[in-house]
């Protein structure tokens, strides 16, 4: 069945959109990074029969997995995020990525020297290469039936550059970081090429039906403050500005944008001024400190340590309550400080969702 990105069912829960616009709301909305994924038994049932990237490329399957946590947790989740991966951009740029069981994503032929950039596709036709994500988004908007809004997302240029050079997840990023100093010009060229694809891709996701956008700079905290300011910040700033311009140019409505620069606590003051409505925090940042630094200029998202979900219900309730109170009745979107881990008990996550919704409502009364 094919669907068009028109006549979407009316939204029944717009809490997260209202808080992102800076409106006062009755409680904190909540969603979870990686809420569709390996901790859910229903994910493994589908995954047994299909490879990871086949699922991403098959709108029916990507839609099904996106809906799994929404079906399971019902009103305890206030947003959905399209099932895909940040590594679809390197694929669109011409690099092969395979998902190895137990190991995660692997690039059989990563970029080793700047000469390897010749292997990248020059003028990527983003809408053609990643049109399968758009189709999954459009289908999911219809199937969600307005239950919650749908996020689109990308990986930030620095994080994607690091994957493209390291060839997958890595303990230290010395290969990709060495480019920054040895091949400075080529690094900027690579970051710019990723940025150009990212802008078109995000706008395409909104055209297809995405109602919010998140940029994952998962490896931001691997950079020194100076290098983050030089090699990440200008590009994530450019992305926010150009997406907004392009949405207007194409006659599309603006959507709230979130930046998650994991580990970049040192850059918090800069992150509020680069065009994102929401700044997502990892658990190493104290919410009260974040409120002081950001001065109400952005909505804050986060940020319990995902490992607390292994600590038993008492610890989850106590930690979540403390966190919600520390964010206060300011503009807050509940989430974890990073993605939910693959071996978490889905019932433990439920306790977290319930606690954030309940306590955030209580403190707003
Ligand atoms: C947003 C998202 C991502 N991946 C997936 C989603 C789906 C939507 C959701 O959040 O529910 C599915 C998603 N992506 C993946 C899986 C597991 C695939 C499987 O084995 O079945 C799922 C469900 C595979 C994947 N993809 C990636 C890894 C990490 C590897 C490493 O650095 O060691 C892994 C393990 C790269 C990746 N992918 C993503 C990030 C950014 C968030 C983060 O920092 O965690 C990153 C770094 C983003």
Image (spheres, rainbow, N blue to C red):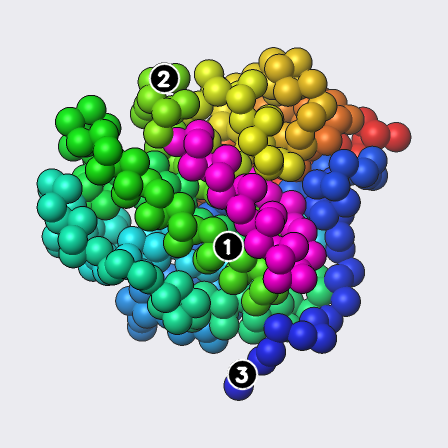
Quarter-wise, where is residue 80 in the image? bottom right
Q: Which residue is drawn at 65% across and 50% down?
A: 255
* Distance CA(mark 1)–CA(mark 2): 27 Å
7 versus 243 height, above or below: below
Q: Which label sits in the foreground, 3 or 1?
A: 1
Q: Is the magenta stretch mostly helix, strand or loop?
A: helix
* Distance CA(mark 3)–CA(mark 1): 21 Å
Label 3 residue SS: loop
Side of 324 where 286 appears, left or right: left
Mark 2 burial class by Cα count in 10 Å: few <14, some 14-19, many 20+: few
List x then y, in percent, for residue 317: 62, 29
List x then y, in percent, for residue 311: 48, 29
N-term-proximal mark, 3 vs 2: 3
Do the residues under discs 3 and 1 have CB atoms within 8 angstroms? no
**Residue tagged by mark 2?**
226
238 versus 83 height, above or below: above
Q: Which disc number belongs to residue 202?
A: 1
User: What is the span of residues highlighted in magenta in the rendered image?
Assistant: 232-258
Q: Which disc number belongs to residue 270?
A: none
Residue 287 seen in the current view = yes
Query: Of residues 335 and 359, which is closer to you in this image?
Result: 335
Q: Which residue is drawn at 66% across and 30% down?
A: 298
Query: Of residues 8 and 156, which is closer to you in this image?
Result: 156
Side of 331 where 182 appears, left or right: left
Do the residues under discs 3 and 2 have CB atoms within 8 angstroms? no
61 versus 310 height, above or below: below
Q: Which disc number belongs to residue 2?
A: 3
């Amino acid at each position: 069945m094919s669907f068009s990105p028109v006549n979407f069912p009316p939204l029944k829960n717009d809490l997260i959109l209202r808080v992102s616009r800076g409106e006062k709301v009755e409680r904190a909305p909540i969603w979870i990074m990686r809420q569709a994924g390996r901790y859910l038994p229903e994910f493994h049932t589908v995954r047994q029969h299909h490879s990871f990237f086949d699922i991403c490329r098959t709108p029916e399957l990507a839609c099904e997995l996106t809906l799994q946590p929404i079906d399971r947790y019902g009103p305890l989740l206030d947003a959905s995020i399209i099932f895909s991966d940040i590594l679809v951009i390197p694929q669109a740029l011409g690099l092969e990525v395979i998902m190895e069981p137990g190991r995660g994503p692997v690039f059989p032929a990563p970029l080793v020297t700047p000469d390897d950039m010749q292997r990248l596709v020059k003028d990527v036709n983003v809408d053609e290469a990643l049109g399968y994500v758009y189709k999954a988004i459009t289908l999911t908007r219809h199937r969600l039936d307005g239950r919650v809004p749908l996020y689109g997302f990308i990986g930030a240029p620095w994080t994607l550059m690091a994957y493209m050079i390291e060839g997958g997840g890595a303990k230290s990023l010395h290969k990709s970081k060495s480019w920054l100093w040895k091949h400075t010009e080529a690094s900027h060229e690579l970051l710019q090429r990723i940025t150009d694809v990212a802008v078109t891709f995000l706008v395409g996701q909104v055209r297809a039906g995405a109602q919010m956008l998140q940029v994952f700079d998962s490896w931001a905290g691997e950079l020194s403050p100076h290098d983050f300011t030089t090699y990440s910040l200008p590009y994530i700033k450019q992305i926010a500005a150009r997406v907004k311009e392009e949405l207007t140019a194409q006659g599309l409505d603006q959507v709230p944008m979130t930046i998650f620069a994991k580990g970049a606590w040192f850059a918090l003051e800069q992150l509020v001024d680069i065009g994102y409505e929401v700044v997502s925090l990892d658990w190493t940042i104290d919410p009260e400190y974040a409120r002081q630094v950001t001065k109400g200029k952005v909505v804050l998202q986060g940020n319990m340590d995902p490992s607390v979900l292994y600590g038993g219900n008492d610890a989850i309730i106590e930690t979540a309550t403390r966190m919600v109170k520390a964010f206060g009745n300011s503009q807050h979107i509940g989430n974890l400080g990073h993605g939910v881990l693959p071996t978490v008990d889905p019932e433990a996550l439920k306790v977290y969702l319930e606690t954030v919704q309940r306590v955030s409502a209580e403190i707003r009364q």
